[in-house]
Image (tube, grey):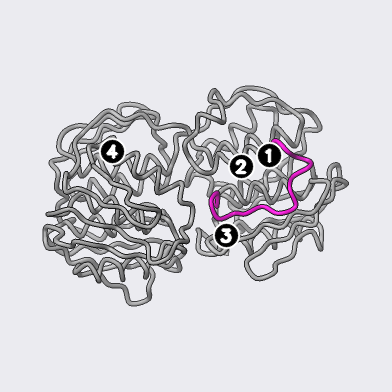
Amino acid sequence: MAVQQTLTVIPPNASLNGKVTPPGSKSITNRALLLAALAKGTSRLSGALKSDDTRHMSTALRQMGVQIDEPDETTFVVTGNGKLQVPEQALFLGNAGTAVRFLTAAVTTVNGRVVLDGDHYMRKRPIGPLLEALQRGGLDVSSETGCPPVIVNGRGGVQAKRFEIDGGLSSQYVSALLMLAACGEAPIEVALTGKDIGARGYVDLTIACMQAFGARVEVLDETLWRVAATGYQACDYRIEPDASAATYLWAAQALTDGHIDLGVAGADFTQPDAKALELIQQFPHMPAVINGSQMQDAIPTLAVLAAFNKTPVRFVELANLRVKECDRVQALFDGLNGIRPGLASVEGDDLLVAADPALAGSTCDALIDTHSDHRIAMCFALAGLKVAGIRIQDPDCVAKTYPDYWKALASLGVRYA
């Protein structure tokens, strides 16, 4: 077996200063790509992210008859006729969670059979609650394992009047149903079966994107939405920078007492992960307890930063992190303890980071198993800014959402071995 590539971050021993422009938001790019594909007319999506996840989405949409042009590195021009066509082959979506969940709902509008599949990591990621909600709405969707591959037998339209979903495991299920609901033959209600919802801010993000493409969404209460049967109309849409990507740069700035200009103020982000900035700005006096439910993708960044905090930090409500690209709670536990035994512990779904400012300037022999998870690779690179000897396995996995991550750090003066 070939030895997997590794990258060693060399601590810069200096403040990181400079300007870095984060890539476009993955979350917004994949929402906008789908809605533009479902719309009638030509939409121009500017500021978009070009990465593995958005490539999987755009490739799948092209397979279903949508014209997508890419005139430059941050623009998609999408032309649709309001309907997706039956693809000739299965849709392969890698490990792009937004793509597989959003498309599973959307392709129920196709008049024919669609198979959605992914890599071996995706085949471990649950999608059962979304399938059950679609089935209760009268749609023909199935999976043998509760994970991809998923088989959809579309009937060319959606006659459901109501979808009910437990959004506790993933807000992406709720977003998938909301985006589908505008394609119904009559108004559709989307209802939560409980009040808990993973990262509610991403549902707000979905609704804002839907409204930009002409949908009408009525918020009846915190657990119920009514979506009019408007379909979608093409528009020109500007995608903001990725807040999850920004967290690494904010943390690098905090760890090195530097100044990194992102070209956008923290207050200008609408994505939930931007809330992490307030916590990062408190370093090295981060709070004793941090709730991860509403800023899930920022937790790996915050957990590594907490290792250098002056006092321990307990991260709570992390169940959703166990069903991401990998079990991120376990991956963080393993990586932190690889840097120094006892640095992290797990109680249920809580992650406790012991915190030790004396780690800065130390040396270890830690091979970080990223499980090909972009966020694990990027967050442990931050530890490498302060501790020598941290090796990142499979560094190219950052291409999933931030292909230029290593270049960005290098532009600030970080070197690698």
**Looking at the image, do the residues carrying marks 2 and 1 touch, with CB atoms under 8 Å apart?**
yes
Left or right of 128? Residue 353 is right
Tag 1 residue? 280
Q: Nearer the viewer, residue 218 or 166?
A: 218
Q: What residue appears at the point 54 percent right and 23 percent down from the top-left corner?
A: 263
**Residue type, label 1:** Ile
Choose mark 4 or mark 2, whichever is in front.
4
Q: Are marks 1 and 4 in contact (CB under 8 Å)?
A: no
Q: Residue 112 in the image: x percent, y percent?
A: 13, 62
Q: Looking at the image, which residue is at 77% across and 38% down?
A: 11
Which label number is shown at residue 211?
4
Q: What secondary structure is marked by label 3?
A: loop
- In the picture, which quadrant includes the C terminus? top right
Closest to the observer, 30 or 89 = 30
Residue 130 locus on image (x, y percent): 34, 65
Q: Is residue 411 above or below residue 150?
A: above
Q: Which residue is mark 3?
A: 371
Q: Secondary structure at mark 4?
A: helix
Side of 330 where 143 appears, left or right: left
Q: CA distance from mark 3 to mark 4?
A: 37 Å
- Magenta region, residue range: 281-296
Label 4 crowd (10 A; few <14 / some 14-19 / many >=20): few
